[in-house]
Image (cartoon, grey):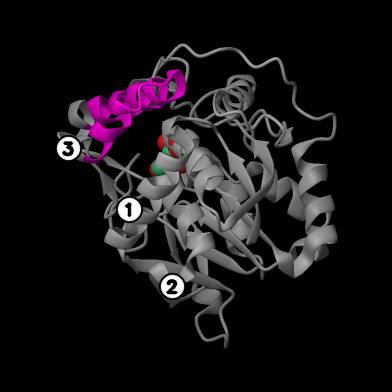
């Protein structure tokens, strides 16, 4: 089993990533840290607690993280994100509000503590803006050099962005944090739009979910239907990209992805703000610390994903 911490801005695909991680027997989720992004921090934290309670896994500790980006320039995408993820971030489904509360310890301190405690046994999977990780890294860089890997859903190297032609959402939301992390020597695996836009879930797959006929299966199917509707309206697309679940999948099954070893940086200014691109300064350095996923066995991942979700829905 792989120990993982999920860093989420719970949104619909973040919720699907949590559900997937709970259902895959290779995953041992030791904690979840939350951040602003698809929705404000408080709502992202509440959504996380509510999703965990919905599937009776409320014993997983949740740690509240950052309210805003490092530069606090308040890059606001909320109008867009609410069209994609709904006003409440989880497709406007109404589920029971969890009585559980987040832990007292902050996400930043928890990330440092867990990195020091688990070292090589630990992978951190970040599927929101990189603010929590950047704060934690700045506070204790050594701690994160010890861990096995940081898997990041973010960026686009070989395809255009999804917020601008250059920038992907999690990166542009806090480009300074992303640059801090990308230019570090931490062991990074980047799961960007290069592979997530090839990993599409369709209504054909989720038809089965409705049939379970339990409260939680109906809620999850309804939430995912909202995501299908958003993709159709915003992109004219049949199906939705499994951005955040794929990052979990690659953390658990690295063999699913073909990677390119190249150190990256992030543009901070101009029309290309938020772009993830090769770092000239490190171009000739041996042994890059970053691997970018450029191809994916999406069929295999989809079968893992469906199996895990069905287990959770049953
Ligand atoms: C990323 O942005 C968010 O909207 C999703 O949850 C995902 O993490 C995709 O660009
Ligand atoms: Ca996310």
> Is residue 225 part of the magenta span, yes or no?
yes
Q: CA distance from mark 1 to mark 2?
A: 14 Å
Q: Earlier in the sequence, mark 1 or mark 2?
A: 2
- Picture layout, residue 95 above or below residue 18: above
The image's mark for residue 255 is 2
- Picture layout, residue 199 above or below residue 206: below
Name which residue lies at 55% across and 23% down.
54
Q: Main secondary structure of the magenta part?
A: helix
Across and down, in percent, residue 307 comes to 39, 49
Q: Which residues are magenta?
A: 205-231
Across and down, in percent, residue 64 comes to 72, 31
Residue 200, visible in the rendered structure: yes
Q: Which residue is mark 3?
A: 237
Residue 212 sits in quarter: top left
**Pointer 1 with pointer 2, Cβ within 8 A:** no
Name which residue lies at 65% across and 17% down.
98
Q: Which residue is mark 1?
A: 302
């Amino acid at each position: 089993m792989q120990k993982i911490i999920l860093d989420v801005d719970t949104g619909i695909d973040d919720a699907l990533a949590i559900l997937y991680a709970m259902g895959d027997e290779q995953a041992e989720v030791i904690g979840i840290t939350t951040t602003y992004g698809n929705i404000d921090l408080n709502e992202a934290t509440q959504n996380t607690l509510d999703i965990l309670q919905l599937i009776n896994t409320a014993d997983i500790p949740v740690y509240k993280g950052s309210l805003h980006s490092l530069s606090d320039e308040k890059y606001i995408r909320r109008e867009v994100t609410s069209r994609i993820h709904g006003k409440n971030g989880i497709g406007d489904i109404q589920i029971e509000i969890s009585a559980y509360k987040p832990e007292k310890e902050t996400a930043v301190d928890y990330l440092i503590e867990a990195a020091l405690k688990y070292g090589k046994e630990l992978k951190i999977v970040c599927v929101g803006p990189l603010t929590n990780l950047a704060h934690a890294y700045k506070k204790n860089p050594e701690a994160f050099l010890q861990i096995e890997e940081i898997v990041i859903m973010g960026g686009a190297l070989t395809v255009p962005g999804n917020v601008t032609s250059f920038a992907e959402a999690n990166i542009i939301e806090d480009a300074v944090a992303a640059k801090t992390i990308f230019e570090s020597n931490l062991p990074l695996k980047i799961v960007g739009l290069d592979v997530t836009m090839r990993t599409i879930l369709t209504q054909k797959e989720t038809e089965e979910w409705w049939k379970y006929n339990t409260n939680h299966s109906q809620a999850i199917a309804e939430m995912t239907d909202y995501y299908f509707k958003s993709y159709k309206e915003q992109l004219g697309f049949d199906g939705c990209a499994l951005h955040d679940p794929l990052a979990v999948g690659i953390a658990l099954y690295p063999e699913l992805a073909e990677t390119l070893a190249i150190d990256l940086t992030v543009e901070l200014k101009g029309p290309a703000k938020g772009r993830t691109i090769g770092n000239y300064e490190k171009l000739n350095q041996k042994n890059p610390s970053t691997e970018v996923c450029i191809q994916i066995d999406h069929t295999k991942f989809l079968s893992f994903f469906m199996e895990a979700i069905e287990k959770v829905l049953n």
